[in-house]
Image (spheres, coloured by chain):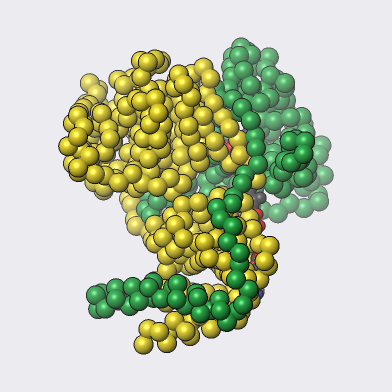
Chain colours: A green, B yellow
Amino acid sequence: MIKTAVCIKQVPAYSDGLMDPNTGLLIRKGLEMVLNPNDLSALETALRIRENYGGKVDVFSMGPKHAEEVIRQAYAMGADEGFLLTGKEFAGADVLATSYTLSQGISAVDDYDLIICGKGTTDGDTSQVSGALAEWLGIPHVNWVSGIKKLSQKTIQLCQEMEGELYTVKASYPLLIAVEREIYTPRMTNLKMKIAAKRKPVKTFRLQDLKDQKEIHYGLKGSATRVEKIFPAKENRSDTEPIRDTAGAIEELALLLKPYAAGRKAKQRVDE
Amino acid sequence: MSGDASKLSILVYFEYHHRRLHPVGLQLMTAAKELIRNNGGEILGIIIGEGADQAEEQMNQLPLSEVYLYESEEYFKSDLYKTLMLDCIQQSSPGIVLIGGTKEGRSLAPRLSAALKTGLTADCTELYVRDGGELVQIRPAFGGNLMAQIITPDTRPQMATLRYNQFPPLKPSVSEAGRRKPVSFIKRKLSTQPSSLLEIIDTARFTASESIGKQDVLVAAGRGVRSKEDLDMIIELAELIGGELASTRRLVEQGWISFHRQIGLSGHSVRPKLLLTIGVSGSVQFMAGIRGAETIIAINSDEDAPIFSAADHAYCGDLYEIVPALISTLKKQNT
Ligand SMILES: Cc1cc2nc3c(=O)[nH]c(=O)nc-3n(C[C@H](O)[C@H](O)[C@H](O)COP(=O)(O)OP(=O)(O)OC[C@H]3O[C@@H](n4cnc5c(N)ncnc54)[C@H](O)[C@@H]3O)c2cc1C
Ligand SMILES: Nc1ncnc2c1ncn2[C@@H]1O[C@H](COP(=O)(O)O)[C@@H](O)[C@H]1O
């Protein structure tokens, strides 16, 4: 029996927000919202653990009221209970405040054995919430988890993909992990499951449902960072006119690349 | 917690693996040195790992005033490293803490920032400092089309991770070492040796992900390449010039190329001496990964392709004509 909490976030389906160069306002093309794809892998990981070892899978999300949709999607995939942390006090949160809010929600519900996060969100894409959340919860954490090697009621063995090196990490519960998207392919849902999920209630947590009810710890007020301004990325490094004559291009390219090709030859000779 | 208000002090986290400094440390040094250039200040370093004191010689060649050394286990563990890092910050009270945007850094930094209840800005691409030591942090936002400018107004230290390979490395210099006050090394040992709840029971090398970030010559293929089979000629060209194959996200999504070879915002940042792009449009997300490239050569059939505005040498033409002809010319030259 392993009790798992999965953190899921609703994100824009297309994250290519643009700024209107005239008004300076943000144009959000992708108003369609989806469950963060990396979190689908996190949920799939939790569901597989439940299938093999028993227990439960609860999901937590912080966001506006319409983030309820991603909890329903998690229900359709097989999650047990879903909790939405919502309210104006939570809005405008940075990593510090987001992770704190999630930690308050999670610890209000149960003493989970495992907390599973996605690798990162497609809108924030910072991969920072998981480590901060683990610190608030006072439990160890492992990022970049690409596989589960062994699991028992007391301990878990994970594959952690560090740079150029694969660690096998062993830990006891409680533990937080952030999984790579490739860890498992998320299951498909069918219409029947979706309909059943619509009827299942989503529990809403507001500030007054949490242990710490000090407003200054949440949302914009609880955030340590401030966004001063947003501006378009500019990429010009040169104004070279492209060369259009193909024969000339090949000749020039061959000349430019010659030293590299020669260098490679020389290196090969040394190697031999 | 805040440092001596009159003097800006910056703590740089040097990743240390197998008794070697990770290149990101020298990239952080470039950023740190720039931050103290106008108004002065000092740079401190921290090294955690097995044989940490063996890095002293290299540290002596960098513009550092103090380096904290923590002899520890070989492998990174987020909880243990956080505890040691916290000790260092309590000892030195820096105004700014810089950490690499590597796998290790991005696992350590958020845990540390929550422990300090301070702000963290991830994956910064540009930094500068205002009078009074306020750090202005700039990072891509909303899928990379926009940049966000972020500050940490009330809490200290101000923490940032820097995008790996975004900044050039600071070259260690023996001559410079002679002109400065020597670096003082502080070997810290905590009264109760902290432990970790994580146990690393095995490690294995794998090569895939280290390849493109550290290559000198890269050939990046984009959607202009029409099929997986056609990649063969790109690979052949790459091999001919001693380069490694890289790609845009489009080809990764097609399943033609492994994610480990993807350049860009959601892939790797690269710093090759030469980057040759073939059939790559030059989306802002792709460009976010190539700022460190020294020379960029671009081949694209669309004269308005944004990649041309970043290229040092731009060729407007059909890759299916240019690449095969180029391969045979290079082969002839070399025989
Ligand atoms: C949040 C987010 C993150 C992203 N992260 C990344 C990332 O990390 N890396 C990345 O690459 N993309 C990323 N993208 C996707 C990015 O927006 C672009 O879709 C992608 O970079 C385009 O790849 P491309 O240049 O291969 O394809 P295209 O944009 O389709 O360009 C193909 C180019 O090939 C040229 N071409 C066609 N035929 C020929 C020919 N015969 N000869 C010569 N040229 C030819 C065309 O003129 C065109 O310019 C991201 C997007 C989002 C929203
Ligand atoms: N608002 C949120 N609600 C629930 N989970 C979140 C939220 N933000 C981030 N997470 C979790 O933290 C992971 C990392 O997010 P990020 O740091 O934003 O890249 C995500 O994959 C989620 O599992």
Work out which quarter of the rendered image holds the C terminus of chain A and state it.
Answer: bottom left
Q: Is residue B15 visible?
A: yes
Q: Residue at x 46, y 56 (%)?
A: B293
Is residue A114 positioned above or below A222 on the image?
A: below
Is residue B311 positioned above or below A135 on the image?
A: below
Please state which of residues A207 and B118 is positioned toward the viewer in this rendering.
B118
Please state which of residues B182 and B93 is positioned toward the viewer in this rendering.
B182
| Outermost residue to the top | A214
Q: Position of residue B106 (x, y in %)?
A: 46, 39
Residue B174 falls left or right of residue A226: left
Q: Residue at x 22, y 39 (%)?
A: B176
Q: Position of residue A85 (x, y in %)?
A: 68, 26
What is the quadrant of residue A95 in the picture? top right
Q: Quarter for ligand 1?
A: bottom right
Q: Position of residue A154 (x, y in %)?
A: 43, 37
Is residue B305 positioned above or below B151 on the image?
A: below
Q: Residue at x 49, y 81 (%)?
A: B327
What is the quadrant of residue B309 in the picture? bottom right
Please state which of residues A154 and A265 is positioned toward the viewer in this rendering.
A265
Q: Is residue B110 visible?
A: no
Q: Position of residue B168 (x, y in %)?
A: 40, 47
Q: Residue at x 40, y 51 (%)?
A: A163
Give the total of numbered labels.
0
